[in-house]
């Protein structure tokens, strides 16, 4: 009878959100002016999975409940930090309401 494998058995040493963040940063170093599509894919998949890992890993942490409650009261990305406007250089894919929120003065 074979043992049932768990994620820990196949995680290749990536066990925490910090481990996955380190992988994301490693993947980011491979993105050049003409990146290979596999490198881009790895970067975006890792970034998407990092959100899930953080959510599961920290869900029992007390601050998680506070952050979730604060975000629930702020529709349309209003819960983003004010400095996030500087992080987003291409807003062509964002809904107009989000763009208005991002360009509001502090």
Image (cartoon, rainbow, N blue to C red):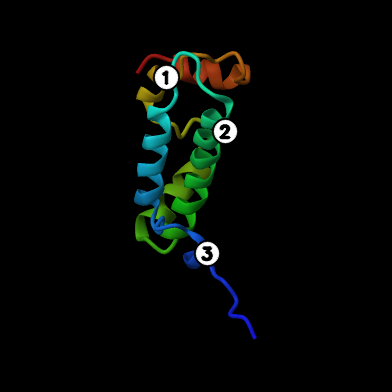
Q: Nearer the viewer, residue 8 or 63?
A: 8
Is residue 16 depicted above or below 45 in this figure? below
Mark nearer the N terminus (1 vs 3) = 3
Is residue 44 depicted above or below 85 in this figure? below
Quadrant position of residue 99:
top right
Q: Which residue is denoted by mark 2 in the rendering?
A: 41
Residue 88 appears at what percent x and percent y?
46, 19
Mark nearer the N terminus (3 vs 2) = 3
Residue 19 appears at what percent x and percent y?
36, 50
- What number of labels is visible? 3
Q: CA distance from mark 1 to mark 2?
A: 25 Å
Which residue: 37% across, 28% down? 29
Q: Nearer the viewer, residue 17 or 81?
A: 17
Numbered circle sitting on residue 59: none
Look at the numbered disc 3 and give the secondary structure of its residue.
Answer: helix
Instruction: From the image, state whether disc 1 or disc 2 is nearer to you.
Output: 2
Would you call the spot at circle 2 few (<14 residues within 10 Å), some (14-19), or many (20 or more)?
few
Which residue: 34% across, 18% down? 106
Residue 46 appears at what percent x and percent y?
50, 41
Q: CA distance from mark 3 to mark 2?
A: 21 Å
Would you call the spot at circle 3 few (<14 residues within 10 Å), some (14-19), or many (20 or more)?
few
Look at the numbered disc 1 and give the secondary structure of its residue.
Answer: helix
Look at the numbered disc 2 and give the secondary structure of its residue.
Answer: helix
Q: Which residue is denoted by mark 1 in the rendering?
A: 85
Q: Are marks 3 and 2 in contact (CB under 8 Å)?
A: no
Q: Which residue is denoted by mark 3 in the rendering?
A: 7
Mark nearer the N terminus (1 vs 2) = 2
Would you call the spot at circle 1 few (<14 residues within 10 Å), some (14-19), or many (20 or more)?
some
Q: CA distance from mark 1 to mark 3?
A: 36 Å
């Amino acid at each position: 009878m074979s043992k049932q494998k768990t994620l820990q058995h196949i995680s290749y040493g990536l066990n925490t959100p910090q481990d996955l963040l380190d992988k994301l940063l490693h993947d980011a170093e491979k993105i050049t002016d003409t990146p290979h599509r596999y490198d881009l894919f790895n970067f975006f998949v890792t970034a998407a999975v990092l959100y899930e890992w953080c959510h599961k890993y920290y869900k029992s942490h007390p601050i998680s409940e506070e952050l979730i409650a604060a975000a629930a009261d702020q529709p349309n990305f209003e819960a983003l930090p004010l400095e996030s406007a500087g992080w987003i250089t291409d807003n062509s894919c964002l809904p107009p309401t989000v763009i208005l929120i991002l360009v509001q003065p502090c």
